[in-house]
Amino acid sequence: MYFKRPVCVLCLAFVLVLFLIELFFPPWTHAGRVRDSISENTHLRVSGTITRIEHREYSVNLYLKNISIISGSMLSEKLTDSDGGEDVFEGLIACLSAASSNEPLHIGSRVTLRGEFSPFEQAENEGNFDAFRYYAIRRIDGRIKKAGIEAVGESYSLIADGLYRLRERTSDVFFRYLDEKKAGTVTALILGDKTELDAEIKESYQNAGIAHILSLSGLHIAAMGLLFTTLLRRMGLKIPAAAALSGVVMLLYSIMTGLSTSTVRALIMFVMGIVAMSLKRTYDLLSAAALSAVLMLLENPYYLYDSGFLLSFSAVMGISLINPVLMNIREEVVKNRLLIGLHNSKSRPAVFLRGLTDSVLFSLSIQTATLPVTQYCFFQVPLFGILLNLLVIPLMSIVLGAGVILAIAGNIAPEITGISGAHALFDVTAYMASRVTAVILGLYDRLAGIAAGSGGALYICGKPGRFQILVYAVLIILLIVLFSFLQSKLKRCRLHGDEADGWNAEGLKKRFAVFSFAMIALATTVLCVRRHAPVELHAVSVGQGDSMLIFGRDTPVILIDGGATDIKNIGKYRLIPCLKAYGIASIDYVFISHFDADHVNGIIELLEDENCGISVKRLIISSAVPLMEEMKKNENYLKFLKAASKRIPVFLMDAGDTIETGEVCITALAPDTKGEQYRNRDLNDNSLVLHLLSKKTGITALFTGDMSAEVEKGLLEELGRGKESLKVLNEPVTILKVAHHGSRTASSEEFTDLLSPEISTISCGRDNSYGHPHKEALQSLSKVEGNHIFITAECGEIIIKADENGISVSSRFK
């Protein structure tokens, strides 16, 4: 029974206490003090011990621990101690240029260098990668940019450095025998090094639900460790000696591959397994997992926030706790002859079907346990993952075996070139192993491509709230507790008769099978439900660019612009993750104000990425765009047309045109192609200007693109002449998206006075070269009584929610 394990109970109590402590002292407390106290680009001279060397295409990253500050400017007194502040940093990453890293470097050596301090960036939008948090969990406080080495100590760790050299040599072997993409995949599989992993393959595996094979875990450690133990036993070694030797080998292998959280967990559990085997004791999976969790948390308590740690242990919990519940459901289904001929049959088809259903339930139990972590961290669930893993996981043992043979033979072959026969033997062995590896990896790639390319392969569920996760966990735990109760009752029935204590064994099992299915369905539903306000407006922080996301309970999904000039791949790293975090799988309307890169390049990325799981129903641009001669050579416009040609309708919108959908009315105010003014305007002044009205909440919003004060003046003049489409401006607007990133060329006092906004949002990049927002624009906006100004460079994502009771405004940083 689950509750007769004192080790598990004590470990669970320890984890709960640790969790409560970390609610008040999160892992980013120290890193936050460093970030707040040391200015970016502060010149530092430090020394530290190299724990890891990472080669990039144009740089070399040194991971440093045991850091001492030799000299530095502008260090805050609150971070320095009485001895001169040598313990300011827990860890740093020194970034060297590839050209300047000719100095021989070794793991464990002491290095002195100087450079500029740079803190890690926080996530500016919901769903974006939080580098600050990620590295704070790993006790790394920042980077040293433009680092230059001054001195390197002579002493270093012979074992750690030798393993690093072996890892580098083995990586070279993989790239010598395999093509670049497959070599990058094998390097991740065997060596735990993802720096060479192809980005498209990584994304494809993630979308297909098989990305777990790219991380060293229990599957790798157990397979290799047990294989090595078996070989030693067949060589004549006794169990204790074979277990001890295999434990040492797997420890060295884990150190060589980087000691990720999943690797450490698997290593500890493997060691406990071979110790149990040596002592001829029973190995208990649940107790081993609990003890390994405590040991890891004692070393670094902040692993509780690490997605790899949570996924790894959730998977083990699924195998040990949820899989028995699902097997009980299967047993009842079989007994009720819903799977005819499967029960107790020894025929090959029946044996195959039993094995298949067991494998499906095994994968499903893991997915059930990891679902909250998957949704919270990745916002999506691969629907074909369970089916693909039925083929992928069995073949992994072959890939691992072939990869290890390739690594061994490929490393030995160059060392024995003088012995022609032996060299040829090892070279052919390495080649044959590489062919086996390439064939299976090619199959993986095709399966992942088919799954990712098929419609509905991804369920974009969004990020669940913590209360939803708590309810899900309570329901699943309740199910496990009841299953434990069922097992005890069934045991009594077997001992004292079928009707013991008034319980009917068969009836009890049937009812529990139905109850289990209903409970899991209810828990999953609770986790997947997303509650939104009637209308929400999100000024997405895209750096020096513009993007506004609108959605809600009574509102279609609308995206107005999406681009930036100071951030690469803005769609991939800012827009798409943000959309997924809110559970948005389809955008009803995408409006593009104009075709400057800082308004459209992210949308083009979204349209070009067919496997991201987000579809666009309609594209709407200004009717002036196809009439402008310069657009024929506009690179962004041509890319847009090519991307939009994939069955996405494009609509033109002119001043006075209106879209009414649900509780929302959108009216175009400019440009007006019926007149001639637009012909003499540049792209900015021909921006599509939109007015939005939420009928249910009564709020209004004005989206101005990059229009200048000259266009504002023209709108005021036309309003004075009684132009019908502009009469909406006679009423104050609730929300104003300030034109042109807060440039002095827009937001005239006359225009802002007329609008009288309650909330003004300005989208611009931090420390941008344009000086946005300009003080003239801020002064004009601040003169409007009751106007609250929010700037994405300071606030991050700005979130405005409205319902019948009013408006609330929040942001990421303020």
Image: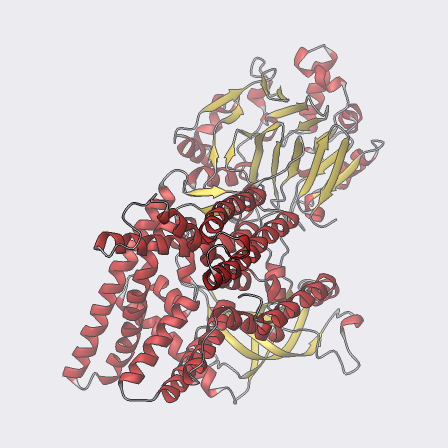
- Residue 114 in view (yes/no): no
* Foreground of the two, 273 or 328: 328
Instruction: Mark yes or no: residue 92 visible.
Output: yes
Q: Residue at x 48, y 70 (%)?
A: 285
Q: What's the residue at 27%, 69% (across, down)?
A: 402
Kindly indicate the quadrant of the structure image that contains residue 549: top right
Pick the front one: 107 or 681 = 107
Q: In this view, does 582 lie above or below 162?
A: above
Residue extending farthest left: 421
Residue 618 pos. (x, y %)? 49, 27
Is the residue 193 above or below the residue 363 in the image? below
Rendering quarter of residue 699: top right
Horizontally, is 321 left or right of 694 in the view? left
Position in image of residue 576 (x %, y %): 52, 43
- Please state which of residues 761 and 706 is positioned toward the viewer in this rendering: 761
Determine the residue positioned at 56% across, 13% down: 674
Q: Give the total of numbered labels.
A: 0
Residue nearest the viewer, comparing 452 with 743: 452
Q: Is residue 790 above or below residue 426?
A: above
Question: Does residue 340 appear to the left or right of 482 in the view shown?
Answer: left
Q: Residue 505's spot in the image, x, y percent?
A: 47, 53
Query: Residue at the spot x=52%, y=26% of the render?
Result: 621
| Place of residue 266 in the rendered image (x, y in percent of width and height, measured from the top left) | 46, 71
Q: In this view, does 720 lie to the left or right of 394?
A: right
* Colour basis: secondary structure
